[in-house]
Structures are given as structure tokens and as C-alpha cells.
């Protein structure tokens, strides 16, 4: 009776052990199938297949290295893209500068010009060769508002010559247009200022000139658009140690009239036109030159009205310069030159701002692009300096006082544009090379990844079936174990 339970127990124990061993194998199969489903790979550990696992690892490692290289190429391409965009903007600025220069050339009325007529001159021509011209003759050049003089001193109808500091014998000389100079001489300092100057209306006619005091402002005004000039008598002054006859403007200054824009030129025996040009150019508001046609040109570079008038002698009249030149308007060659200079500053600022991650290829910074994981295969891309100095662009020469100055700027702009076009082509070629190499590396990386996948890719349908089968078999084995244990316990309870 005792042998029977022992054998039964032994048999049940063997059944359970066998079932547990099978369950462990099924668990391992289930885990492997689950991992395959999760990763999409049938080989996830070297123990699965060491040869295929190592090949997969090397291929994926190579693909990762190529992806790193492509990241570097992408950054390099962004730098080249930035440089290309900046060059496009630089070309736009150069075109705008060219338009500004052309506007200065085309705007013939922008600058107030006066030009000689009857004689063909050279810089070596003598001033005294002009008829009615002698040593010591003087002429006046005035820029700015020329039909009105307004006093800077507050006055009223009772203000006298004595009140403004004039003395008996002081003289004021006035000229209206091309009419003769007239002289107003102080005989009585108690005379009101307005009455003293009203003599001009009697001399020239009240329909041509007016004198008035309004709101405390004394004005002398031309009524026929002819320029008004003020001067004084000649007096002797020591200039550079030499007694020299100069025009005395003290009386005009006493009235508060501004004579600072009036320049007096004294003609000297043996003096050439080259000396005259030098003297005229000392006036920052004037420019002068003898053109290819042999004519003397005098201009106000700010486009303000310009008057040239003989004081003594007939130099200006004989040259045909004694005509009224009206204002060139709001836009002048000087203002176009200023606009041009501002555009050059914008070019330099744009170049300075053309940076990407600290690299500025438009200031000459170079760039190394790597094509392989170990860096052995690479390409060095040279940067190109494209600031105004490198482009050969300079500020407007002499504020574009003559057409030749503008033509020089246009020639420089043409060269600058050619340089920019060449630089643009350079960066476009380099960008195309990077794009081509990047496409190649992308294809190569995908090839490695595809190769690795073909070695280790799992059949997901098979893995899912295996997982389901293992799970079902485990459930059956667990049921067998439970039944065995229950049966053994029932049998043993009989003894």
C-alpha cells in the first residue's frame, strides 16, 4: 500500500518537471518573438548570430558616420547660402548706387551753373588777355538767396544810422542785376535807416526794388527776380606783408546783412586761369573747371542760386558770365553724392552682418568641408572680401562737382558689379559641389542601412505567429501542471 503513493508521486513530479522545462523554452521563444516585433530585427544580440550581428553593427556605424558628415555639409551649405544671399543684396545696393550716379549726370538743372561763351580758354590762358580786363580789377561771386537781403538786427522805422554804428562818410554800394553799381554815402547819421536805403527805389525804380521794415526785419528785395549785390568801397589792407586793395563790407555788415557768401576775386597781371580755378575752389560751395570745349564753368555744388558780377573792369561781362542763375532745386549733384556715400556705408554694414556661426565668407573667412568620417577627404572653400575697399569703391570724388567725377564712380561701380558676379558664381559652384556630395552620401548611407536591415530584419508575421503559439502553449502547459497537481492530491488523499 505504501509503494503505490510513492510511484504516483514520482510520476507526477516528472510530469511537472518536464512541463516546467518546456514552459521555460516557450518563455524564451515568446521573449525573442516579442523583441523581434518591437525592434523589427530578428538578431538583437551577438548570441543570436554573432557574424550577422557584427556585420549589422558595422553597417549601421558607417551610416551614422556618414550622417554626421552630412550634418557638417548642411552647415557649410547654410554658410554658402548666407554668402549668396548677401551678394544678391550687395548687387542691389550697387545698382542703386549706379542709379544715383546716373541721376546726378542726367540732372542738368540740379546744379547752378554759369558758363563762359565767346572765348576758347585753357588753364594757361592769361586773365588779362580778356578784353576790358586789367591788373587789380575785381569781380564778385555770390551763392545762396540772391534776390533778398534781410537784416539780422531788429529795427523799426525810427532806427537811425547812428544807432547801428555808422559814421559820416561810410559808403554802401549796391547793384541790381546787370545795371550799374550805385553808391549810398552817409552824410547825416541821424537819418533813419529806412529813409537812407529808400534811395535805392529812386535810383532803380520802385517797380524793380523795395526797401521795408516789417516785424522788426529790414529787407532789401528785388522785384524783378534780378539778383541784388551789396559791397563797399575799396580800401588798402596789408595782405601777406603787401599793401593790397580790398573791398570793404563793413557798412553792409553794420546793417546786419550777411555777406559771408560773397567772394571777391582780384585779377593780377600775369595770372593764368589755372590760378583763378584754384582761388574759386577755395570756396567750399563752388566748383570750377575749363571743359573740353574750352569754356569756363563755375557752379554752386549745392544747387543754390549763383551770381557772378564785375565790381571793376569788364572781365565777367566779356566772358558772358554776368547772367542770373537760378537755384538747381532741392536735389543737387552734392546731395546725390551724399546719397551715394550713404549707400557705400550700407554696403560695408551689410558685409559686416553677413555672418553664420561666426564665419563671414564676405570678409575673407575660409571654410573647410569634410566629405568622409575620418576627415581625410575634404574641400577648402575660400572666402572673398567684398567690402567697399575690396570692391574698389570710394566716396564721391570732389562731391561729384564735375561729370568726370561721376563717370569715374560709374566705372568703379561697373568693376564692383563684375567682382560681385564672379563671387556669386564662385559660391554657387561650391554650393553645387556640396549638394552633389551630400546626395551621394545620402544614397550611400541609405545603402548601408538597407544592407544592415536585410541581414537582421525580422519576419514580423512569423514573429507574431511564434509569439501567439508560445503564449498558447504556455497556457496549455500551465493547465497540465495544474491538472497534474490536483490529480496527485486527490489520489494521495485516498491513502
Image (tube, helix red, strand yellow):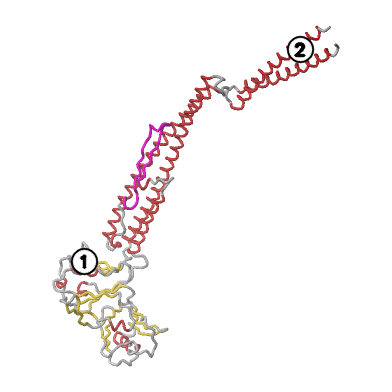
Please tell me whether residue 426 is drawn above or below residue 122 in the rendered image.
Answer: above
x and y percentages locating residue 86 in the rendered image:
40, 48
User: Which residue is found at the position 80% from the left and 16% from the top?
Assistant: 486
Q: What stretch is highlighted in magenta?
A: 364-390
The residue to which callout 1 is attached is 295
Observer able to see residue 195: no
User: Where, quadrant-wise, is the N terminus in this rendering?
Assistant: top right
Image quarter of residue 409: bottom left
Gap in angstroms between the C-alphas marked 2 and 1? 133 Å
- Crowding near the residue tagged with mark 1, few <14, some 14–19, many ≥20 C-alpha atoms within 10 Å: some
Is 449 magenta? The answer is: no
x and y percentages locating residue 325 in the rendered image:
30, 71
Image quarter of residue 382: top left
x and y percentages locating residue 148 in the rendered image:
34, 78
For label 1, the SS is loop
Please tell me whether residue 390 is drawn above or below residue 177 in the rendered image.
Answer: above
Amino acid at each position: 500500500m505504501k509503494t503505490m503513493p510513492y510511484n504516483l508521486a514520482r510520476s507526477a513530479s516528472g510530469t511537472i518537471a518536464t512541463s516546467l522545462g518546456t514552459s521555460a523554452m516557450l518563455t524564451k521563444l515568446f521573449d525573442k518573438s516579442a523583441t523581434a516585433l518591437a525592434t523589427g530585427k530578428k538578431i538583437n544580440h551577438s548570441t543570436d548570430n554573432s557574424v550577422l550581428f557584427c556585420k549589422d553593427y558595422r553597417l549601421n556605424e558607417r551610416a551614422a558616420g556618414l550622417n554626421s558628415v552630412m550634418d557638417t555639409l548642411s552647415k557649410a551649405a547654410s554658410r554658402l547660402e548666407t554668402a549668396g544671399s548677401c551678394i544678391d543684396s550687395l548687387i542691389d545696393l550697387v545698382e542703386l548706387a549706379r542709379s544715383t550716379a546716373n541721376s546726378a549726370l542726367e540732372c542738368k538743372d540740379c546744379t547752378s551753373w554759369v558758363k563762359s561763351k565767346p572765348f576758347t580758354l585753357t588753364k594757361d590762358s592769361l586773365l588779362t588777355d580778356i578784353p576790358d580786363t586789367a591788373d587789380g580789377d575785381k569781380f564778385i561771386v555770390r551763392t545762396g538767396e540772391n534776390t533778398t537781403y534781410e537784416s539780422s538786427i531788429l529795427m523799426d522805422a525810427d532806427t537811425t544810422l547812428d544807432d547801428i554804428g555808422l559814421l559820416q562818410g561810410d559808403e554802401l554800394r549796391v547793384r541790381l542785376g546787370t545795371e550799374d553799381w550805385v553808391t549810398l554815402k552817409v552824410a547825416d547819421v541821424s537819418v533813419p535807416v529806412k529813409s537812407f536805403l529808400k534811395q535805392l527805389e529812386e535810383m532803380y525804380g520802385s517797380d524793380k526794388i523795395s526797401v521795408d521794415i516789417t516785424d522788426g526785419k529790414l529787407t532789401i528785395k528785388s522785384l524783378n527776380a534780378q539778383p541784388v549785390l551789396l559791397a563797399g568801397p575799396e580800401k588798402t589792407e596789408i595782405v601777406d606783408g603787401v599793401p593790397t586793395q580790398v573791398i570793404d563790407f563793413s557798412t553792409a555788415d553794420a546793417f546786419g546783412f550777411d555777406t559771408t557768401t560773397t567772394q571777391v576775386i582780384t585779377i593780377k597781371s600775369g595770372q593764368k586761369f589755372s590760378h583763378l580755378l584754384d582761388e574759386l575752389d577755395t570756396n567750399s560751395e563752388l566748383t570750377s573747371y575749363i571743359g573740353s570745349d574750352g569754356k569756363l564753368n563755375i557752379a554752386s555744388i549745392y544747387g543754390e542760386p549763383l551770381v557772378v558780377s564785375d565790381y571793376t573792369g569788364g572781365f565777367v561781362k566779356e566772358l558772358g558770365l554776368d547772367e542770373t542763375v537760378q537755384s538747381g532745386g532741392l536735389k543737387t549733384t552734392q546731395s546725390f553724392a551724399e546719397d551715394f556715400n550713404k549707400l557705400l556705408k550700407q554696403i560695408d554694414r551689410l558685409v559686416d552682418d553677413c555672418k553664420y556661426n561666426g564665419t563671414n565668407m564676405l570678409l575673407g573667412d575660409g571654410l573647410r568641408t569634410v566629405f568622409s568620417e575620418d576627415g581625410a577627404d575634404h574641400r577648402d572653400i575660400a572666402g572673398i572680401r567684398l567690402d567697399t575697399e575690396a570692391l574698389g569703391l570710394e566716396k564721391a570724388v570732389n562731391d561729384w562737382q564735375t561729370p568726370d567725377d561721376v563717370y569715374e564712380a560709374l566705372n568703379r561701380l561697373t568693376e564692383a558689379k563684375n567682382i560681385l558676379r564672379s563671387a556669386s558664381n564662385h559660391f554657387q559652384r561650391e554650393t553645387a559641389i556640396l549638394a552633389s556630395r551630400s546626395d551621394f552620401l545620402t544614397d550611400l548611407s541609405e545603402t548601408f542601412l538597407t544592407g544592415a536591415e536585410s541581414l537582421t530584419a525580422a519576419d514580423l508575421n512569423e514573429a507574431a505567429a511564434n509569439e501567439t503559439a508560445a503564449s498558447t502553449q504556455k497556457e496549455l502547459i500551465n493547465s497540465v501542471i495544474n491538472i497534474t497537481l490536483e490529480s496527485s492530491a486527490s489520489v494521495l488523499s485516498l491513502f
